Amino acid sequence: MTDQQTAELKQLPLATLHRDAGSPMMGLCGWEVPAHYGDPEGEYKAASNTIALLDASFLTKVHATGSDHVEYLNRRLSQRIIESEPGTVLRANQLSGDGRMEADLEVLRLAENESLLLAPPAVGGGYLQAVADKYVFTEDATFTDETHRWASLALVGPKGTEILRALNLPMPTVGQATEGTLGGITVKLFVSEFFFGSVILLFDVEDASSAWKSLREAVEKAGGRPLGFLAFDTLRVEHGTPWWGIDLTERSIPLEADLMTAIHTN
């Protein structure tokens, strides 16, 4: 990778921390992310058997607001979200006129007139914002790329519940987000299909360093370790979790990709 190519990659909020920890960096769909922390095999085993901590701030995050945004998204997405309540998390696909995928995402309902659209990194924030508001005419619906406002960390492994309990954080159930406090930091927690059932912690980007430190201490105390993308991607493939830009493209059809959880058949 050339210096010019590296300069063009987007940086994680904790990029300096990862480099200082000795992690070599790699490109991922326009981002520079930690490849590993010195022992990819050990990281894989930790995520499989105990717990591992992944910096998932590369997730695209688009903020949806307005009194009509839920009804509008209900018309535009493959999922029925019109009756979803605040705190609901739903997998959905943005589809073109011929039923092919334009984006793969999860919709997190924050409040009555507020939602957050989250997607793997290849669905860039500017792209998702443009696709989301493509047919907004008179509706009260606004979509804003806020990828760099939010940081996100993933607890990957079977001891996720144990870690949350040790930190006095609530364990979210599938399809429902919760909120808690981590060392004075307000965090939203939800289970993500993109991370094959792992818990994602979402919080303000200014709190990234403090949150990482607290979670890493708890993870290492439980016998785990930080997780680079090389080991994570191996686990993702083993779990059969496709990502847009890697396994899915604009030619993909949700039914052919076996994305049944993203489709409401009525």
Image (tube, rainbow, N blue to C red):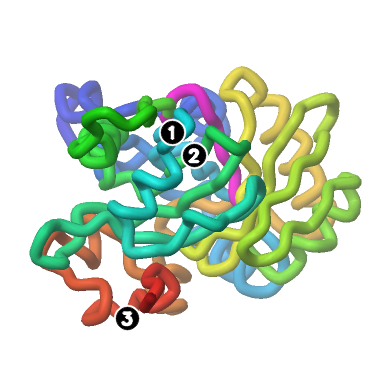
Return the residue at label 1.
64
- Which mark, by number, is residue 131? none
Write the residue at 31% across / 54% down: 75
Decide which of tag 3 and tag 2 comes sooner along the chain. Answer: 2
Q: Residues within 10 Å of mark 1 (few under 14, many from 20)?
A: many
User: Foreground: 1 or 145?
Assistant: 145
Q: Is residue 149 magenta?
A: yes
Residue assigned mark 2: 116
Pinpoint residue 91: horizontal percent, then vertical percent: 45, 61
**Tag 2–tag 1 contact (CB < 8 Å):** yes
The x, y position of residue 97, in whole percent, is 11, 59
Left or right placement of residue 169 versus residue 192 in this view: right
Crowd around label 3: few <14 · some 14–19 · many ≥20 (10 Å): few
User: In front here: 251 or 14?
Assistant: 251
Per the image, the residue denoted by label 3 is: 258
Q: Amino acid at mark 1?
A: Ala
Q: Is residue 147 above or below residue 116?
A: above
The amino acid marked with disc number 3 is Asp
Task: Determine whether 5 is above or below 173 in the image.
Answer: above
